[in-house]
Image (tube, rainbow, N blue to C red):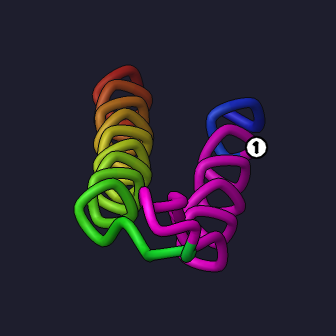
Amino acid sequence: MELAFESLEEAREQLKVAQDTPQTYTGADGRTYRNMAKYEENVQAAQENIRMHENNIQALQTELANLK
């Protein structure tokens, strides 16, 4: 169970990194632009990863409760 919580914390750290890291690209004119679609994709993937870990923890807690 402790490993599940550690994985959840790692997923939360990945979300923070995704939110704090803007996706950029250099246009043909040499200027730097933000790639909002890629940024949103990364943040959404990190949020989904957190939801998956939270669901897994809830399932583990339910299974452990059923064993008692």
Look at the picture and state if 31 lies above or below 25.
Answer: below
* Quarter of the picture holding the N terminus: top right
Q: Is residue 7 left or right of residue 26?
A: right
* Viewer-nearest residue: 35 or 50: 35
Residue in the image at 43% along x and 41% along y = 53
Residue in the image at 53% along x and 64% along y = 24
* Viewer-nearest residue: 12 or 63: 12
* Viewer-nearest residue: 58 or 20: 20
Packing grade of label 1 (10 A; few <14, some 14-19, many >=20) is: few
* Viewer-nearest residue: 48 or 39: 39
**Residue 22: percent from left, percent from top:** 56, 73
| Magenta stretch encompasses residue 16 | yes
Q: In this picture, which residue range is highlighted in magenta?
A: 6-30
Q: Is residue 1 left or right of residue 67?
A: right
Amino acid residing under circle 1: Glu
* Quarter of the picture holding the C terminus: top left
> Which residue is denoted by mark 1 in the rendering?
6
Residue in the image at 57% along x and 67% along y = 30
| Magenta stretch encompasses residue 59 | no
Quadrant housing residue 14: bottom right
Quadrant housing residue 61: top left
Look at the picture and state if 39 lies above or below 57.
Answer: below
Look at the picture and state if 11 lies above or below 43.
Answer: above
Quadrant housing residue 62: top left
